[in-house]
Every structure is written in structure tokens, then in C-alpha cells.
Image (cartoon, rainbow, N blue to C red):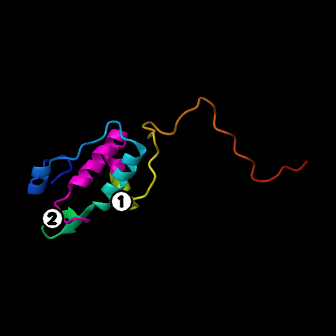
Amino acid sequence: MRVGEQSTDPIDQILGELPVPAPPTPEDVRLAVRAVVVHAAEEWPAGPLCRDDGATYPCRLHRWGRRVLERHGLNGRQVDALVRHGNPFVHVPFPFPVTGPARTGHPPPAAAPRWPRAS
């Protein structure tokens, strides 16, 4: 099953999807990072299963975490990188800089010289 597909798991069909907060708070983002990392895929002979609860991958919590992080501004590649990183406590900036670091309009500070100059 792909991340965007509807689950065929009976539990998922009964309970439905977890609601995504709009807009996500910093706590929502922290929980979403944990959800995608802890509920990552693990390969089994029958196909990928959730590493935490053994449900068909992606499980409800993984899907919820991915949707929260995407609403926060991360793209699919960035979420996949978080999962590969494997740290459920990694910090995702809030607000997330979609186009890179925040620009202040000032040039970056000049680097200090490595060696003192002779006077």
C-alpha cells in the first residue's frame, strides 16, 4: 500500500483517519516526527508492516504524522529523510522555512580571520 492510498485494514475502515490540526502547533510537529519515525516500515515476507504495531504500512499514526509534517511545510523527500535519520526526537524548526533559512535583509556576518594579523 502506498502512503496516499486508502487502507484496507478493518480497524482503519472503522476508526477512519486521525484529524490533522490546522495549523499544526510545535507540539503537533514534535508528535508527528515521532509518529513517522517510530511507525516506519519494516520488511516482512508478506510485505512492509509498521515497525511498532505490525499493521499494514503505513499505519494510521504514520499517515497522520506525514500529513501533519506536510501541512507544516515539509515535502515527501524531507519526511522520508526524517524517517531514514531514525531519531524520533529530531528538531524540526517552527515555523518551518519553506524556501530556506529566514532572510533578514542584512548580509551574513563576515568570518573572523583564522590567524591574527601581524601589526
Q: CA distance from mark 1 to mark 2?
A: 19 Å
The N terminus sits in image quarter: bottom left
Residue beneath disc 1: 84
Q: Are marks 1 and 2 in contact (CB under 8 Å)?
A: no
> At label 1, which amino acid type do we have?
Arg
Characterize the local packing of mark 1: few (<14), some (14-19) or many (20 or more) Cα atoms within 10 angstroms: few
Q: Earlier in the sequence, mark 1 or mark 2?
A: 2
Secondary structure of residue under mark 1? helix
Query: What number of labels is visible?
Result: 2
Residue beneath disc 2: 47
Instruction: Give the x, y percent position of residue 7.
Output: 13, 51
Residue at the spot 25% in from the left edge and 54% down from the top edge:
61
Q: Is residue 28 left or right of residue 4?
A: right
Mark on residue 69? none
Instruction: Give the x, y percent position of residue 108.
Output: 64, 38
Identify the residue at the far top of this view.
105
Secondary structure of residue under mark 2? strand
Identify the residue at the far bottom of this view.
45
Instruction: Give the x, y percent position of residue 113.
Output: 75, 48
Residue 61 within the magenta-colored segment of the rendering: yes
> At label 2, which amino acid type do we have?
Gly
Residue at the spot 26% in from the left edge and 48% down from the top edge:
64
Rendering quarter of residue 43:
bottom left
Residue at the spot 13% in from the left edge and 48% down from the top edge:
6
Residue 39 within the magenta-colored segment of the rendering: no
Q: Which residues are magenta?
A: 51-79
**Is residue 35 among what the camera can see?**
yes
Residue at the spot 22% in from the left edge and 47% down from the top edge:
18
For the residue pair 76 and 37, the one nearer the viewer reads as: 37
